[in-house]
Image (cartoon, helix red, strand yellow):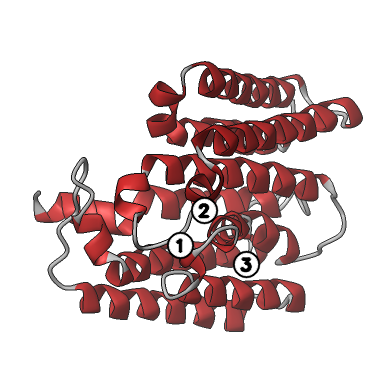
Amino acid sequence: MSSLKLLYKLTRLEQCFIAAISTWLITLLNDGNSWFTNENIFPALCLFFSCLGANLFHYGMKWRMYQEKYWNPIIIRRPHLLKILGLSSFVVAGIIATIWINSTICFIFLGLFFLVIFFYPIILDRRWPWKNLSIAFCCLSPVVVGYTAANPGKNLLAWSIACVVFFVYLASEIIKDIDDQPVDQGRRITMVMAIGEYRAIRIAFNLILVAMGVIINILIHSSLATISSIFYLLGIISLAYYGSKLITSPKTMVPRYQLLDISILCLMLAVFTAQIPL
């Protein structure tokens, strides 16, 4: 694997940019008329460096596990350097939050996020449900940080979006554990190990149904522009497609759990298009 490709895998830059852009989009729910202000930009930058730090620190702590993924191995030769870079990225995010984010609620959540990320590879990932709940909680950070960074309380749509994000990524983590069973043996106790693959798939499917129900509720109770409504519908369709295929063809769909990200992309596009005057 080339150095650039390895760097891309370790940093997961696409996730960092998605987290930053999602945070910026959620800030628009509080004030759609101000697209580029300190209240929009610095929370997004904070999430970018937080996500970058989380990825680097995780790979630095779990380098042996990723080397043993025979179907997609990642060879890490300097794990201690990744830990240092990850913690340094957290420090940068902390400086940004301290100087430019004035919301106490947002600052407290960021502190909890850092603690979860730090302790996840040390102890939280060893047993379900803490493993799955920790990741789902961290995936909420763009929504919660974006909403509470400035003028929280004006738009409750963010909490509905937070519910969708939480349930989708909780389902995704359960499905991912099914795919990772060979490398998880002896390292952690996941849901699929505890209750079996059949029940784990059913639980993930039900979580997807709950997420679909929340999006449907948004459509029913919100006055939305036509384009925005289309993206919400696409999010529902993508969840329905993956959920139905997961039940009927689990061996095909379990390795493709990242398809659930499409629903979150549709959700963010719905938020964005709702801010554009038609």
Task: Report helix, strand or loop for mark 3.
Answer: helix
Q: Earlier in the sequence, mark 1 or mark 3?
A: 3
Residue 141 location (% of width, % of height)? 61, 60
- Tell me if residue 213 can be seen: yes
Residue 162 location (% of width, % of height)? 71, 49
Q: Amino acid at mark 3?
A: Asn
Label pair 2/3, CB-CB below 8 angstroms: no
Q: Say which quadrant the C terminus sits in.
A: top right
Residue 16 sits in quarter: bottom left
Residue at the limit of the structure toward the left, as seen here: 2
What residue is shown with label 1?
51
For residue 38, the mark is 3
Q: Amino acid at mark 2?
A: Ala
Crowding at dot 2, Cα within 10 Å, few <14 / some 14-19 / many 20+, comes out as: many
What residue is shown with label 2?
19
Label pair 1/2, CB-CB below 8 angstroms: yes
Placement of 278 over or under 129, stated as above or below: above
Task: Report helix, strand or loop for mark 2.
Answer: helix
